[in-house]
């Protein structure tokens, strides 16, 4: 029995380089970097004082009123904005959203850190009676999907998936499977994150995961595959893709960005924070995604890398690509857009899928910013695009690698009847 074909019919995004898909894509094409000094709290006493914040985000301009916002964590505000944009882009009507075969799948890795820190401050410094009464329903991970379902009237499944940095990619895969199985016709799928807080930055810095030597030069801090890289840059935002069964999309005359051809997942079973040094788990996920898509490694033109700018990830990911693609790895165009957006954790995979889709639409391969000296000693010898590349992109792949050894991989291709 042939698989149901799934296409992408809508996109929505809030990122450190733009508060819409078009603004984000324009910034990516121009090689703009969203990393800067932290403004969300006073970070002057921290070793890491930079992050990739969402800028000039006014919820009122994105369909939310001030009363609603007081009842939502920051990641939920981003998610709702991205969802509004995606359904408008897809031309979805209220009755379609309310249908039992429409759902939402959201990846979230860190929950509402902003709400948690505020509640802890009230508890420890002002007493138990001062804890905000809505703290729990605001900071729990499923709050984002729940709010979107309520605001948009989505009555089908509204699920939240947490696999750390792979959450957004795994949410896309879960949405794909829900539609393929026949349980859904449409699924809003993606991820959201907002964890730029004192506790979060201090915690990640404590495990030596963040770049710490670029406080006075933040635009150069995220440098995937470069020999001077030293850690990732915490980012925030949200990305939503409208996934839809092909015949359902055709019946309503929807525009189609691309076909979502395949998904694969795996676990390293190796270490709680470090990827497998040989890239075995990531390679398995990528190989499974290609098999699911019924495509060969040579069919892939572009790979949007997890590319966190950490010593361990970039070397292991390069080995992963060589395992999965063989000699074709040296012909691939590879880039890490985290060099511009920072690392959006649970939203990363969704944002990188959106950027890749726009690249496929425009036949534009985004660059890896700040790649000045590839780390050849660690085997980083592929074509990581220090400058943008113009050329036809028929298909792309992307892998997200999460703490705990979670690996998710997607393959998308230009749509053909």
Image (cartoon, helix red, strand yellow):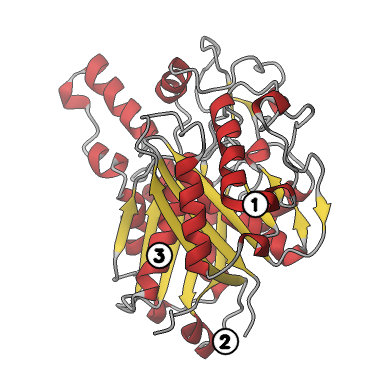
Is residue 71 toward the left or the right of residue 242 in the image? left
Q: Name the residue under label 3.
A: 175
Callout 1 secondary element: strand
Q: Position of residue 219 (x, y in %)?
A: 71, 28
Is residue 116 toward the left or the right of residue 39 in the image? left
Callout 3 secondary element: helix
Between circles 3 and 2, the one closer to the viewer is 3
Bin the neighbour count of mark 1 within 10 Å (Cα to Cα): few under 14, some 14-19, many 20 and up: many
Q: How far apart in space, not on screen, are marks 3 and 2 (Cα)?
A: 21 Å
Contact between marks 3 and 2 (CB within 8 A): the answer is: no
Q: Which of 146 and 203 is in front in this view?
A: 203
Contact between marks 1 and 2 (CB within 8 A): the answer is: no
Q: Nearer the viewer, residue 50 or 172?
A: 172
Q: Position of residue 82 (x, y in %)?
A: 51, 56
In primary-sequence order, the first of circles 3 and 2 is 3
Which labelled disc corresponds to residue 303? 1
Q: Nearer the viewer, residue 7 or 126?
A: 7
Between circles 1 and 2, the one closer to the viewer is 1
Q: Mark 2 points at which residue?
A: 253
Look at 51% across and 53% down and name the residue there.
Answer: 286
Task: Tell me the quadrant of the picture where the N terminus can be found.
Answer: bottom left
Look at 61% across and 78% down and name the residue there.
Answer: 255
Look at 42% across and 74% down and name the residue there.
Answer: 186
Task: Tell me the quadrant of the picture where the C terminus can be found.
Answer: bottom right
Q: How far apart in space, not on screen, are marks 1 and 2 (Cα)?
A: 30 Å
- Whether residue 385 is visible to the viewer of this picture, yes or no, is yes
Q: Position of residue 10 (x, y in %)?
A: 55, 69
């Amino acid at each position: 029995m042939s698989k149901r074909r799934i296409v992408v019919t809508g996109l929505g995004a809030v990122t450190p380089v733009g508060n819409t898909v078009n603004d984000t894509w324009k910034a990516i094409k121009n090689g703009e970097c969203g990393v800067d000094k932290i403004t969300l709290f006073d970070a002057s006493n921290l070793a890491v004082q930079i992050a990739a914040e969402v800028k000039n985000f006014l919820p009122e301009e994105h369909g939310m009123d001030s009363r609603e916002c007081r009842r939502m964590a920051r990641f939920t505000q981003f998610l709702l904005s991205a969802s509004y944009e995606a359904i408008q882009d897809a031309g979805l009507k209220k009755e379609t959203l309310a249908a039992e075969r429409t759902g939402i799948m959201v990846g979230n890795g860190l929950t509402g850190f902003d709400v948690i820190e505020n509640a802890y401050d009230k508890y420890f410094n002002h007493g138990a009676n001062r804890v905000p009464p809505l703290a729990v329903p605001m900071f729990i991970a499923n709050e984002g999907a729940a709010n979107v379902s309520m605001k948009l009237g989505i009555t089908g499944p509204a699920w939240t998936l947490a696999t750390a940095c792979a959450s957004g990619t795994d949410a896309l895969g879960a949405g794909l499977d829900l539609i393929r199985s026949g349980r859904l016709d449409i699924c809003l799928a993606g991820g959201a994150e907002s964890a730029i807080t004192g506790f979060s930055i201090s915690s990640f810095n404590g495990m030596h995961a963040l770049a710490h030597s670029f406080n006075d030069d933040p635009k150069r801090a995220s440098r995937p595959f470069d020999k001077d890289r030293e850690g990732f840059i915490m980012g925030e935002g949200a990305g939503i893709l409208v996934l839809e069964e092909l015949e359902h999309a055709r019946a309503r005359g929807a525009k189609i960005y691309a076909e979502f051809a395949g998904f694969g997942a795996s676990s390293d079973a190796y270490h709680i924070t470090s990827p497998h040094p040989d890239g075995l788990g990531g390679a398995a996920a990528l190989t499974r995604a290609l098999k699911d898509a019924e495509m060969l490694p040579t069919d892939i033109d572009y790979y949007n890398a997890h590319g966190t700018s950490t010593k361990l990830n970039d070397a292991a990911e390069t080995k992963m690509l060589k395992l999965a693609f063989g000699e074709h790895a040296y012909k691939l165009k590879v880039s890490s857009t985290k060099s511009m957006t920072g690392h959006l954790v649970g939203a990363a995979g969704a944002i990188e899928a959106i950027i890749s889709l726009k690249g496929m639409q425009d036949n534009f391969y985004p660059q890896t910013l700040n790649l000045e000296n590839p780390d050849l000693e660690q085997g980083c010898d592929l074509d990581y695009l220090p400058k943008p590349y113009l050329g036809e992109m028929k298909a792309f792949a992307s892998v997200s690698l999460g703490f705990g050894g979670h690996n998710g991989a997607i393959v998308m291709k230009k749509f053909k009847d």
